[in-house]
């Protein structure tokens, strides 16, 4: 059974097959650097209190359940994507 790949996945597969990928020289150090960057990016060091309609909170909770994350994490993710220009309107 062959899995159908998305366009981005097909590009990655083709790139891999062309041997365009290289190993990093010091894997442990590289992973440590990436983990530190991720930790610093995801650090939640400030608190924000907002008022929001009960219906909207219920919808957020429903969406969060569908995704499998806490609704506060979903809200934080949406805000993060928005302020970084990664949230696109449909």
Image (cartoon, grey):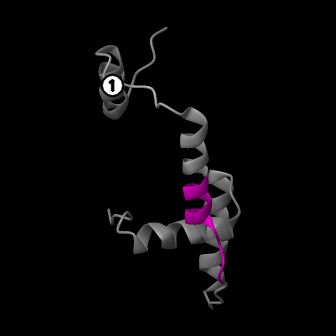
Seen as rendered, the residue at the extreme top is 1
Instruction: Give the percent coordinates (x, y) of residue 31.
Output: 58, 42
What residue would you read off at disc 1? 10
Instruction: Give the percent coordinates (x, y) of residue 17.
Output: 33, 14
| 66 relative to 86 in the view: left or right | right
Vertical comparison of 51 with 89: above or below:
below
Q: Residue at x 64, y 60 (%)?
A: 64
Instruction: Give the percent coordinates (x, y) of residue 86.
Output: 37, 63
In the rendered image, the quadrant that contains the C terminus is bottom left
Instruction: Place residue 40 in its image quadrant.
Output: bottom right
| 62 relative to 14 in the view: left or right | right
Q: Residue at x 41, y 74 (%)?
A: 83
Instruction: Place residue 57 in its image quadrant.
Output: bottom right
Q: Is residue 12 magenta?
A: no
Q: Residue at x 58, y 71 (%)?
A: 76
Instruction: Give the percent coordinates (x, y) of residue 87.
Output: 39, 65
Which region is colored magenta?
36-46
Instruction: Place residue 10 in its image quadrant.
Output: top left
Vertical comparison of 53 with 67: above or below:
below
> Main SS type for the magenta part?
helix
Vertical comparison of 63 with 53: above or below:
above
Vertical comparison of 12 with 56: above or below:
above
Q: Nearer the viewer, residue 81 or 27?
A: 27
Crowding around mark 1 (Cα neighbors within 10 Å: few <14, some 14 to 19, many 20+) is few
Looking at the image, how many numbered discs can be counted on the residues? 1
Q: Secondary structure at mark 1?
A: helix
Q: Residue at x 65, y 62 (%)?
A: 62
| 17 relative to 54 in the view: left or right | left
């Amino acid at each position: 059974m062959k899995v159908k790949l998305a366009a981005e996945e097909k590009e990655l597969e083709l790139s891999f097959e062309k041997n365009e990928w290289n190993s990093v020289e010091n894997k442990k150090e590289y992973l440590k650097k990436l983990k530190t960057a991720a930790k610093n990016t995801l650090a939640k060091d400030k608190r924000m209190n907002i008022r929001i309609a009960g219906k909207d909170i219920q919808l957020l909770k429903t969406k969060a359940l569908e995704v499998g994350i806490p609704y506060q994490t979903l809200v934080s993710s949406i805000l993060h994507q928005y302020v970084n220009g990664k949230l696109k309107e449909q």
